[in-house]
Amino acid sequence: MGYESWEIHDEFRAVAGDLLAKHPDADVRMLAQAGWLGLEAPEGVGGAGATFREVAIVAEEMGRAVACGGYFGGAVLGAGTLISLQSNTFRDLLLKDLVSGAVKIAVAVSADHESFDGTAPFALSQTAGGLRLDGRSVFVPDAAGAGRLLLLANDPAGTPVIVDVASDAAGLAITEQPVVDGTRDFAAVSADDVSVAKSSVWPFDGDPGLHVQRLLDRAAVAVACDSLGVAEAMLSATVSYAGVRHQFGRPIGSFQAVKHACADMLVRISVARPLVRTAVDAVAEGGPEVSATASMAKSYACGAAVKIAGKAMQLHGGIGYTWESGIHAYLKRAALNRCLFGSPAAHRKRLAQRYFEAKQDEEQ
């Protein structure tokens, strides 16, 4: 990327950060008015025709402001899923409605909140009465209140497809699931013999398995971006507080123990930032290293954010444990991010398996 691209990204980051700082409870309509839901969508449907790099910037700023809203379900998963499908009239109309904010959609691409192996949580079967859908997915982002659901399912031949289902379809149940992070919404989605029209079954534009894995990888990277924003916000808040909070007649930031703690926080962020940036670039450009870079970023950045938020709460002293301080919101968000779309341990295991297989290939 050239200097001009970085300059544009810096300006975009500043605008996004300013808007979310003023409106941390931004809803889908506000996200659509800002143009964020359609960043990757083609200009023909009202989108900006941008890349995942721009999506990642907003994801990071969402974490920095611990913002609410349906950005993850709409832009990260929703738009990403629709763009990966073969173009058809119904898909194009839904993408246009998503970009404009006319409809809120949710996407279920995994059986649970930690799964990232590409296994479809739903299955289609051919009966005398037509296609039927069954299955269940838990902790689906922004499913509560969504008008349309995009469900990853295996068709009768075993090929992964996306099934478009109305939220009020007979046999479909959406149950809200409480989580530690009160800034975001999740729900369990179950389908019990749901009737599906053939026009609602949408194939991927290319290798289905590859597209599914790319969707899971981009979700993991987006969560890593959110955690990076959380971590940077906590370091900034802690350094600022250490400069104004006095003990024994001087700022607590002058004490060696506090200096070392802040330095450790900065080191963790300095390691996480290039890992996340590399993963974002890999998702935006595609290629064989997407999964590896996604696992590196997700495992380190999300683990580091929990440690940084916890240390920030400790360094804020008694006020850090109060509801009014707001530190708890960052710690809870970081804790949830750590397990969404694969825990650090699960992603490290995937990396280890990758290197083990590469070593075996070399020996052969």
Image (spheres, grey):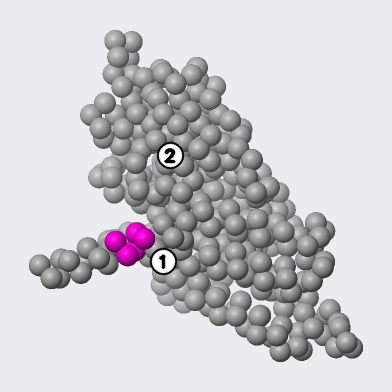
Spot occupied by residue 234 in the image (x, y as percentages of width and height): 67, 69
291 and 260: which one is in front? 260
Q: Quadrant of residue 168?
A: top right
Q: Position of residue 334 (x, y in %)?
A: 60, 59
- Residue 336, placed above or below residue 242: above
Q: CA distance from mark 2 to mark 1?
A: 22 Å
Image position of 292 (left or right of 182): left
Nearest the eye: 239 or 264: 264
Check the image and name the residue furthest to the top.
128
Front-most of residues 169 and 94: 169
* Label 1 environment density (alpha carbons within 10 Å; few <14, some 14–19, many ≥20): many
- Residue at (51% x, 31% y) in the render: 189
Residue drawn at x 61%, y 34% is 176
Queried whether the magenta region covers residue 351, the answer comes back as: yes
Q: Indicate left or right for 126 with 57 as reference.
A: left
Which residue position is annotated with label 1? 296
**Region in magenta:** 349-353
- At label 1, the amino acid type is Met
**Residue 305 placement, left or right of 323:** left
Secondary-structure class at tag 2: loop
Taking the magenta stretch, the answer to whether it contains residue 4 is no
Residue bearing the label numbered 2: 111
Count the numbered circles shown. 2
Give the quadrant of the C terminus: bottom left
Given the image, on which type of amino acid does mark 2 rest?
Ala
